[in-house]
Image: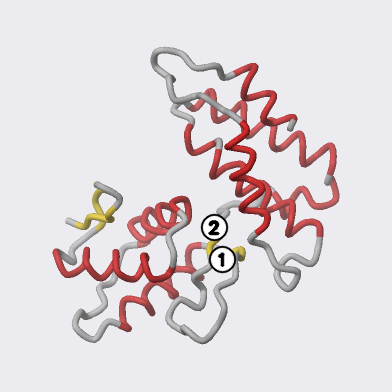
Amino acid sequence: MQLYQLLIQKLPPTPTKFHYIFNLRDLSRIYSGLCLTTPAHFHEPRHFVRVWRNECLRVFYDRLVSDEDRTIVNGKLESLVEDNYREHKEDVLRDPILYGDYRNALDTEEPRLYEDLGDYATIKSLFEEVLKDDKKQESSKMETNEIRAVIKYICKKGMSPKEIYEDMVDTLREDTSSYSTVKNGKLRFN
Protein backbone atom coordinates (compact mmCIF):
# COMPACT_ATOMS: atom_id res chain seq x y z
CA MET A 1 0.00 0.00 0.00
CA GLN A 2 2.89 2.37 0.68
CA LEU A 3 4.09 2.09 -2.91
CA TYR A 4 0.55 2.66 -4.19
CA GLN A 5 0.15 5.74 -1.97
CA LEU A 6 3.47 7.12 -3.21
CA LEU A 7 2.34 6.69 -6.81
CA ILE A 8 -0.92 8.52 -6.13
CA GLN A 9 0.85 11.40 -4.37
CA LYS A 10 4.07 11.83 -6.37
CA LEU A 11 3.01 10.74 -9.86
CA PRO A 12 -0.36 12.29 -10.67
CA PRO A 13 -1.68 12.29 -14.23
CA THR A 14 -0.57 15.25 -16.35
CA PRO A 15 -1.17 16.15 -20.02
CA THR A 16 2.03 14.29 -20.98
CA LYS A 17 1.47 11.49 -18.45
CA PHE A 18 -2.27 11.08 -18.83
CA HIS A 19 -2.00 7.32 -18.34
CA TYR A 20 -0.65 7.73 -14.78
CA ILE A 21 -4.00 6.76 -13.35
CA PHE A 22 -3.34 4.26 -10.59
CA ASN A 23 -6.32 2.58 -8.94
CA LEU A 24 -7.39 -0.47 -6.99
CA ARG A 25 -7.50 -2.54 -10.15
CA ASP A 26 -3.70 -2.22 -10.26
CA LEU A 27 -3.46 -3.60 -6.74
CA SER A 28 -5.66 -6.53 -7.75
CA ARG A 29 -3.28 -7.25 -10.65
CA ILE A 30 -0.38 -7.43 -8.19
CA TYR A 31 -2.31 -9.78 -5.93
CA SER A 32 -3.36 -11.89 -8.91
CA GLY A 33 0.31 -12.34 -9.76
CA LEU A 34 1.06 -13.30 -6.16
CA CYS A 35 -1.73 -15.88 -6.31
CA LEU A 36 0.07 -17.61 -9.19
CA THR A 37 2.80 -18.71 -6.79
CA THR A 38 3.03 -22.25 -5.48
CA PRO A 39 4.66 -23.48 -2.25
CA ALA A 40 7.03 -25.67 -4.26
CA HIS A 41 8.70 -22.68 -5.92
CA PHE A 42 8.10 -19.98 -3.30
CA HIS A 43 8.90 -21.69 -0.01
CA GLU A 44 11.03 -18.90 1.48
CA PRO A 45 10.07 -15.27 2.21
CA ARG A 46 12.77 -13.99 -0.16
CA HIS A 47 11.12 -15.84 -3.07
CA PHE A 48 7.72 -14.37 -2.31
CA VAL A 49 9.07 -10.84 -1.81
CA ARG A 50 10.92 -11.14 -5.12
CA VAL A 51 7.74 -12.09 -6.97
CA TRP A 52 5.98 -9.17 -5.24
CA ARG A 53 8.68 -6.86 -6.60
CA ASN A 54 8.23 -8.37 -10.06
CA GLU A 55 4.49 -7.78 -9.96
CA CYS A 56 4.96 -4.16 -8.79
CA LEU A 57 7.41 -3.57 -11.63
CA ARG A 58 5.10 -5.22 -14.12
CA VAL A 59 1.99 -3.30 -13.04
CA PHE A 60 3.40 0.11 -12.11
CA TYR A 61 6.98 0.56 -13.32
CA ASP A 62 6.35 -0.52 -16.92
CA ARG A 63 3.85 2.33 -17.28
CA LEU A 64 6.34 5.03 -16.35
CA VAL A 65 7.76 7.19 -19.11
CA SER A 66 10.59 9.15 -17.47
CA ASP A 67 13.79 8.10 -15.76
CA GLU A 68 12.92 10.43 -12.88
CA ASP A 69 9.63 8.60 -12.27
CA ARG A 70 11.35 5.22 -12.51
CA THR A 71 13.95 6.36 -9.97
CA ILE A 72 11.17 7.34 -7.56
CA VAL A 73 9.49 3.94 -7.84
CA ASN A 74 12.75 1.97 -7.67
CA GLY A 75 13.82 3.98 -4.64
CA LYS A 76 10.56 3.26 -2.86
CA LEU A 77 10.73 -0.45 -3.69
CA GLU A 78 14.31 -0.59 -2.38
CA SER A 79 13.39 1.24 0.83
CA LEU A 80 10.39 -1.04 1.43
CA VAL A 81 12.57 -4.11 1.00
CA GLU A 82 15.28 -2.59 3.21
CA ASP A 83 12.79 -1.69 5.96
CA ASN A 84 10.85 -4.95 5.96
CA TYR A 85 13.13 -7.67 4.51
CA ARG A 86 16.67 -6.45 5.10
CA GLU A 87 18.08 -9.98 5.30
CA HIS A 88 16.73 -10.77 1.81
CA LYS A 89 17.54 -7.44 0.16
CA GLU A 90 20.34 -8.67 -2.10
CA ASP A 91 18.32 -11.54 -3.55
CA VAL A 92 15.05 -9.58 -3.88
CA LEU A 93 16.67 -6.63 -5.69
CA ARG A 94 18.79 -8.77 -8.03
CA ASP A 95 18.27 -8.14 -11.73
CA PRO A 96 17.15 -9.28 -14.24
CA ILE A 97 13.77 -10.14 -12.85
CA LEU A 98 12.00 -12.51 -15.27
CA TYR A 99 8.93 -14.51 -14.26
CA GLY A 100 6.70 -16.73 -16.32
CA ASP A 101 4.94 -20.08 -16.50
CA TYR A 102 6.58 -21.45 -19.62
CA ARG A 103 9.65 -23.33 -18.46
CA ASN A 104 7.81 -26.51 -19.50
CA ALA A 105 6.20 -24.93 -22.55
CA LEU A 106 6.83 -27.92 -24.80
CA ASP A 107 5.72 -30.58 -22.32
CA THR A 108 1.94 -30.50 -22.36
CA GLU A 109 1.77 -33.15 -19.62
CA GLU A 110 3.61 -30.98 -17.07
CA PRO A 111 1.73 -28.26 -15.19
CA ARG A 112 2.74 -24.71 -16.01
CA LEU A 113 3.97 -23.08 -12.82
CA TYR A 114 4.73 -19.39 -12.37
CA GLU A 115 8.37 -19.11 -11.37
CA ASP A 116 11.55 -17.07 -11.47
CA LEU A 117 13.13 -17.94 -14.80
CA GLY A 118 16.63 -16.84 -13.83
CA ASP A 119 18.84 -14.84 -16.11
CA TYR A 120 18.89 -14.23 -19.85
CA ALA A 121 21.31 -17.08 -20.59
CA THR A 122 19.04 -19.59 -18.85
CA ILE A 123 15.86 -18.51 -20.57
CA LYS A 124 17.54 -18.09 -23.96
CA SER A 125 18.05 -21.86 -24.13
CA LEU A 126 14.34 -22.37 -23.38
CA PHE A 127 13.29 -20.14 -26.26
CA GLU A 128 15.79 -21.75 -28.62
CA GLU A 129 14.32 -25.13 -27.67
CA VAL A 130 10.82 -23.84 -28.49
CA LEU A 131 12.07 -22.58 -31.85
CA LYS A 132 13.79 -25.88 -32.65
CA ASP A 133 10.60 -27.79 -31.90
CA ASP A 134 8.89 -26.41 -34.98
CA LYS A 135 9.80 -28.89 -37.72
CA LYS A 136 8.81 -26.51 -40.51
CA GLN A 137 11.14 -23.72 -39.45
CA GLU A 138 14.82 -23.99 -38.59
CA SER A 139 15.89 -22.30 -35.40
CA SER A 140 17.63 -19.00 -35.91
CA LYS A 141 20.41 -17.83 -33.62
CA MET A 142 19.42 -14.53 -32.09
CA GLU A 143 21.94 -12.09 -30.75
CA THR A 144 22.02 -11.66 -26.97
CA ASN A 145 20.52 -8.16 -26.92
CA GLU A 146 17.78 -9.17 -29.32
CA ILE A 147 16.75 -12.23 -27.31
CA ARG A 148 16.76 -10.10 -24.15
CA ALA A 149 14.31 -7.68 -25.74
CA VAL A 150 12.06 -10.57 -26.77
CA ILE A 151 12.25 -12.17 -23.32
CA LYS A 152 11.43 -8.91 -21.54
CA TYR A 153 8.48 -8.34 -23.87
CA ILE A 154 7.06 -11.82 -23.32
CA CYS A 155 7.57 -11.76 -19.55
CA LYS A 156 5.93 -8.37 -19.18
CA LYS A 157 3.05 -9.20 -21.50
CA GLY A 158 2.27 -12.40 -19.58
CA MET A 159 1.77 -14.54 -22.64
CA SER A 160 0.86 -18.20 -22.28
CA PRO A 161 3.27 -20.85 -23.60
CA LYS A 162 0.98 -21.54 -26.54
CA GLU A 163 0.80 -17.83 -27.41
CA ILE A 164 4.57 -17.50 -27.12
CA TYR A 165 5.16 -20.47 -29.39
CA GLU A 166 2.61 -19.39 -32.00
CA ASP A 167 3.78 -15.78 -31.95
CA MET A 168 7.46 -16.71 -32.35
CA VAL A 169 6.81 -19.27 -35.07
CA ASP A 170 4.52 -16.95 -37.05
CA THR A 171 7.01 -14.12 -36.77
CA LEU A 172 10.01 -16.24 -37.73
CA ARG A 173 8.17 -17.54 -40.78
CA GLU A 174 7.83 -13.94 -41.95
CA ASP A 175 11.54 -13.16 -41.60
CA THR A 176 14.37 -14.61 -39.53
CA SER A 177 17.10 -11.98 -39.49
CA SER A 178 16.66 -9.98 -36.26
CA TYR A 179 14.29 -8.58 -33.66
CA SER A 180 13.05 -5.11 -34.44
CA THR A 181 9.72 -3.95 -33.02
CA VAL A 182 6.49 -4.99 -31.40
CA LYS A 183 3.37 -4.12 -33.37
CA ASN A 184 -0.23 -5.06 -32.71
CA GLY A 185 0.83 -7.40 -29.91
CA LYS A 186 3.10 -9.39 -32.24
CA LEU A 187 6.84 -9.65 -32.13
CA ARG A 188 8.35 -8.41 -35.35
CA PHE A 189 11.72 -9.37 -36.73
CA ASN A 190 13.60 -7.58 -39.53
Identity, as a three-letter code, of the amino acid under mark 1: Leu
Q: Position of residue 164 (x, y in %)?
A: 37, 66
Horizontal side of 92 relative to 106 (left or right) equals right
> In this picture, is 162 found above or below 129?
above
Q: Position of residue 178 (x, y in %)?
A: 22, 59
Kindly state the secondary structure of the residue where label 2 is placed. Answer: loop
Q: Position of residue 65 (x, y in %)?
A: 44, 28
Q: Quadrant of residue 117?
A: bottom right
- The residue at the far left in this view is 174
What whole-number distance in Å separates the C-alpha atoms at marks 2 and 1? 6 Å
Kindly state the secondary structure of the residue where label 1 is placed. Answer: loop
Q: What residue would you read off at disc 1?
A: 117
Mark toward the start of the polypeptide (2 vs 1): 2
> In this picture, is 75 found above or below 142?
above
Q: What residue would you read off at disc 2?
A: 98
> In this picture, is 101 found above or below 53?
below
Q: Quadrant of residue 133?
A: bottom left
- Give the quadrant of the C terminus: bottom left
Q: Residues within 10 Å of mark 2 (few under 14, many from 20)?
A: some
Front residue of 124 and 62 = 62
Q: Position of residue 8 (x, y in %)?
A: 62, 21
- The residue at the far top in this view is 15
- Kindly identify the residue that appears in the image at 51 percent across and 86 percent down: 109
